[in-house]
Amino acid sequence: MTNPYQKQLRVAIATTQSSNLEDGLMTLARKHEASLQFGRISSLESLAMPYGQLAWDLLLAELDYPGLQWKLQNDGIRCPVVVLVEPPREAEALELLEAGQIADFVLTSQAQMKRLPSVLRAAAARGRLRGDWRADGPRGILQEAVYQIAEASEKAESLDALLPRIHEIIG
């Protein structure tokens, strides 16, 4: 069985700047093209495809992206969100993180941007484990449940110990 956490992540980029920040993200995309696929979106509404499926696995957005704060506060984004933040505004991002409105944040300093690929992968994995998002619709839900049951069966000492965990997974 292949590990669904090893697939290429589709990362939507929502930035208002088209300068150095975007260039830096595209450089990262080329360097990590086997595991990360970046694409720029024109609005937050373009995250979803018809029938409610997600077109992207993760959203990488500037803190000031139009409509982002409102959507975060009103539970309007169905995938994990990683926010890019200027260092002076780190406290704002920390508040969003502590409130559970974002999966993580990265400061826009050059040193911090080097962490971005690992932050994105970790945020996506946490989102999958918590069941925050389903990029593949019903098939993704089933695949995720099968994967979680397989992991639980490896850890369980007996069938009696496994059954409650299976019921927890499938709800």
Image: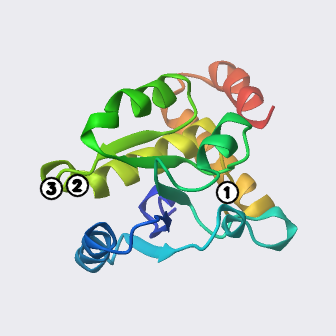
Circle nearer the viewer, 3 or 1: 3
* Residue 42 located left or right of residue 27: right
Q: Which residue is mark 3?
A: 110
The image position of residue 14, as x and y in percent, is 51, 64
Q: Which residue is mark 2?
A: 113
The image position of residue 25, as x and y in percent, is 31, 69
Q: Residue furthest left?
A: 111
Name the image quarter holding residue 159: top right
Residue type indicated by callout 2:
Met
Circle 2/circle 1 CB separation < 8 Å: no
Cα separation, mark 3 vs mark 2, equals 5 Å
The image position of residue 55, as x and y in percent, is 66, 70
Residue type indicated by callout 3:
Gln
User: Which of these two is toward me, 118 or 66?
Assistant: 66
Circle 3/circle 2 CB separation < 8 Å: yes
Q: Which residue is mark 1?
A: 143
Precedes in sequence: disc 2 or disc 1:
2
Cα separation, mark 2 vs mark 1, equals 32 Å
- Secondary structure beneath disc 1? helix
Circle nearer the viewer, 2 or 1: 2
